[in-house]
Amino acid sequence: MYYTNIYYKQINNNEMNTDSKNIIKLEDERDKKILNFNDFQKQNIKFDISKLQEAYRQIIQTKKFDDGGGISHFGAICLTRIPGDPESVKGHKARGLYWTKPNTSGKEVSRDVKIDEAAYSEFVPDFENTYFKEIFDIISKKYKLGRVRILLKEPRSTLSWHRDPEPRLHIPIFTNPGCLMVIENVAKHMPADGSVWITNNTKYHNAFNGGEENRIHLVACVLDYKFN
Ligand SMILES: [Fe+2]
């Protein structure tokens, strides 16, 4: 577990040549609490990471990541679609509605298009002979899912600071220690070991890849998961 959130303490050590009166105390009652990872919930289910990585290598031979309508540092391959509708996995529909606070005003705005997540019930036929189909069959029985996507986060890239309409299920496929997801003021690395996580994306969050290789996650929208 990574304790990445630091609160600032007044330094009382006289050996340090620091005038403590010049340090502004940033700690407050909220930050003094023990870190709470409740917005990252590891699920009681595990998949075979070697098979996951192999399935990814298999699909990447024939499919390219969609850039969500020309968005830098965004890449998605949809594993589910609206039945019989190949257009439902392209461009803005590979990305979808979110809210962000893009400038100094701090005012929230919405971006991109609303998605009818529940309509994405068909597994894309091109990927039926991969391990992703087995995974889909299992998780779609356990949770009510919307779109299921393979998401790419390139090295030295970040998302916007944003919130989504619903939680997300994550299965990391390739990652590195510099990949962190941040939800409000709590950061967490999710290892690629076959584990399944559900993250509270209805709160403001971000994800970045500070490594030198691509971060690849299977990410599904979860329509029936309630965080307490
Ligand atoms: Fe998000």
Image (spheres, grey):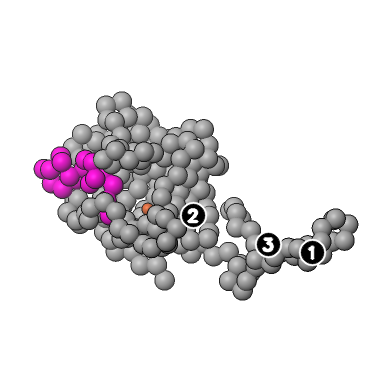
Q: In this view, does 53 lie above or below 42?
A: above
Q: Residue furthest front?
A: 105
The magenta segment: 79-97
Which residue corresponds to mark 2? 182
Q: Does the magenta stretch include residue 108?
A: no
The C terminus: image quadrant: bottom left
Q: Which residue is drawn at 44% across and 52% down?
A: 206
Graded by Cα atoms within 10 Å as few (under 14), some (14 to 19) or many (20 or more), the crowding at tag 1 reads: some
- Do we see residue 87 in this rendering? yes
Q: Distance between the residues labelled 2 and 3?
A: 19 Å
User: Which numbered disc flags the more N-terminal residue, 2 or 3?
Assistant: 3
Which residue corresponds to mark 1? 20
How far across and down, in percent of the image, does residue 32 sit? 63, 69
Give SS at disc 2.
strand
Q: Does the magenta stretch include residue 86?
A: yes
| Left or right position of 4 against 69 | right
Foreground pick, 18 / 55: 18
Graded by Cα atoms within 10 Å as few (under 14), some (14 to 19) or many (20 or more), the crowding at tag 3 reads: some
* Amino acid on which the number 1 mark rests in the picture: Ser
- Determine the image quadrant of residue 110: bottom left
Foreground pick, 179 / 192: 179
Q: Mark 1 and ligand 1: say if the CB distance to the nearest ligand atom is below 8 Å.
A: no
Q: Which residue is drawn at 41% across and 50% down?
A: 160
Which residue corresponds to mark 3? 8
Front: mark 2 or 3: 3
Q: Mark 2 and ligand 1: say if the CB distance to the nearest ligand atom is below 8 Å.
A: no
